[in-house]
Image: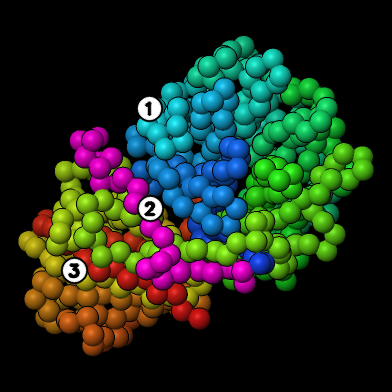
Amino acid sequence: MKKTLLLLFTVVLFTSANAQKQYDNTTGTTYNNPVFAGDYPDPSILRDGEDFYIVHSSFDYYPGLLIWHSKDLINWEPVTSALNTNVGPVWAPDLIKHNNKYYIYFPAKNTNYVITADRIEGPWSEPVDLKISNIDPGHVADEKGNRYLYFSSGDYIALTKDGLHTQGELQHVYNGWEIPRDWTIECFCMEGPKLFKRGEYYYLTVAEGGTAGPATSHMVIQARSKSPVGPWENAPNNPIVRTQSSEERWWSQGHATVFEDAHGKWWMIFHGYEKGFYNMGRQTLLLPVEWTADGWYKIPDGVTAESTLTMPQGKALTGFDLTDDFKGKSLKPQWRFWGSPDASRFSATKNGLVIKGKGNGIGDSSPLACVPANRSYTAEVEMEIEGDANGGLVLFYDNTHFVGMLADKENILTNLRGWQFVTESKVHKRHVYLRLKNVNNTVDMYYSTNGNNWIKIENSAEVTGYNHNVLSGFLGLRIGLCSVGNGTVTFKNFKYTPLP
C-alpha cells in the first residue's frame, strides 16, 4: 500500500511554459509579497550552497511536509513530500542540514518527531518519536558538534550526535521580550524559535503576541548570546517586525527565520494574514535584512511587507499552475487528502482520477484539497458518478466547516454550513460539471451538463468567517473535491482561473 501511495503522490515538476500563472508578484526586477500566496504558514528555510529549500506546516493534510526548492527565493518548485506516515496534525517544522544529512524536526500530537534523508529529494525516513512534548522545535549546533533543540517555552534539550534522540533534561534559559502592557495583543505566546550563528554571537529569533487575534498581535523578537544555550540578551530594537495598525495590508506578522544567501545578503522569511482575507490562511512573506554597527539585525528603514522590493537575483516569477486534467500517472503536488489517504480508495487512470466514496457527508469523506492563491477565482471540475456516490466541489476549512455543491446520479445539491439539500432536481444523468466562483469571499455556484453552458443555482455563500479567529485550527479555506457514500466519482479537467 505504501508503494502505491508513493507512486500516486510522486511529485511532478511542471514549468510555466504551458501553465497559467497562479499568481504573479513581480515586474521582472522587483517583487511584492507574498512569495507563497495562500495557506503556507510557519515557513522554515534552509540554504544549501546556492540552493534554498523551504517547508511549511501541513496540519491534517497528507502526504505532509512538502519541500520546495529555489535558486532565487522567488521562483519555487516542489521537490517531494517528506512525510507519508500519518502521525497527526503537523505544525511548525524546522528544516536543517547537519553533517551532510537533512533533518526535519516537527511537533504532532503532544510529542516531537524527526525525519531524516541523505538527499533532499529523499527517500525520507519514517518519523522517530523524540518522546518530548512542547511545540515549535528549533535546532542549533555549536562548533564542537553539540546539538540542541529549542522549544516555544524558552526551554532547550540536548540531542545525541545523530540528532535522533534527546539526552538529559529540559533547561529553561529564555523568558522572551516583555511586551508593553498597553499593546493590543492576543497573548504573550512565545513560539517559533529559530537559531543561527554570525560572528561571535548566536542569534535567537522568536515570535510573540499570539499567532492570530488582533491585527497587531504577532511580532518578531531577537536575542543573542555567545553560547547556544544562553544567557540571552534581548535586542534594543525589538520588535523587529510588527503590524502597527489594522489599516495595514499584512496582519499578525511573525514566525520568522533569518538567513544569509550565497552572495552575502541577509533575508527574513515569515508569515502574515492578509487584511480582509483572513480565510486564506497565513501567507509566506520575504523582506531584506541589514545589520547595525553594534551587531543586531533589522529591516531597512522605510521597508515593510507592503513595499515593492528588489528581486534577490533579478529574475522573474515563473509561476505554477493548479489546473489539472487528472490524466497523469500521479497527482500534481498541490493535492493533499484531509487525513490519511487510503491507497485502495483512489487511482489515477487515463480517464481521470477515480475516488471511491467514503463517509456520509463532506466532513467524513476525506476531501482532496489544494490551496487557492488568489482573493478571487473560479474553480471547476467535470465528474462522472457511479453507484450511490455523491461528488462535490467545495470550499473546505476542516471536517466540520465547509460550503459548496455536490451532485448525485441526477440532482444538484447545495451544502451551506452543513445544511445540505437538493437545489436542482433531475437535471443530469451521472455526468456533470460543477463550478465555484469566489469574488472577494462571496461565492456563487454553477453547474453544466456540457462544460460550456453554465447555470447558476439560486444559492450563494459568504465565506469571510471561515478563519482561525472564528473557528480556531490555524487553517485556511481550501478547494476540495469530495467523493461521498457508496460508489465512485471520476474527476476530470479541474480548472483554476484567477480573477482580477
**Distance CA(mark 2)–CA(mark 3):** 26 Å
**Looking at the image, is mark 3 or mark 1 earlier in the sequence?**
1
| Residue positioned 67% across, 36% down in the render | 193
The residue positioned 54% from the left and 69% from the top of the image is 24
User: Nearer the N terminus, badge 2 or badge 3?
Assistant: 2
Q: Position of residue 108 (x, y in %)?
A: 47, 34
Q: Which residues are magenta?
A: 1-28
Q: Which mark is residue 13?
A: 2
Q: Is residue 281 magenta?
A: no
- According to the picture, the residue beneath numbered tag 1 turns out to be 126
Residue 89: x and y in percent read 43, 41
Of the residues under marks 2 and 1, which one precedes in the sequence? 2
Towards the viewer: 378 or 260: 260
Q: Residue 164: x percent and y percent?
A: 50, 19
The residue drawn where x is 17% and y is 82% is 450
Queried whether the magenta region covers residue 3, the answer comes back as yes
Question: Label 3, on which residue?
Answer: 383
**Quadrant that contains the N terminus:** top left
Q: Secondary structure at mark 1?
A: loop
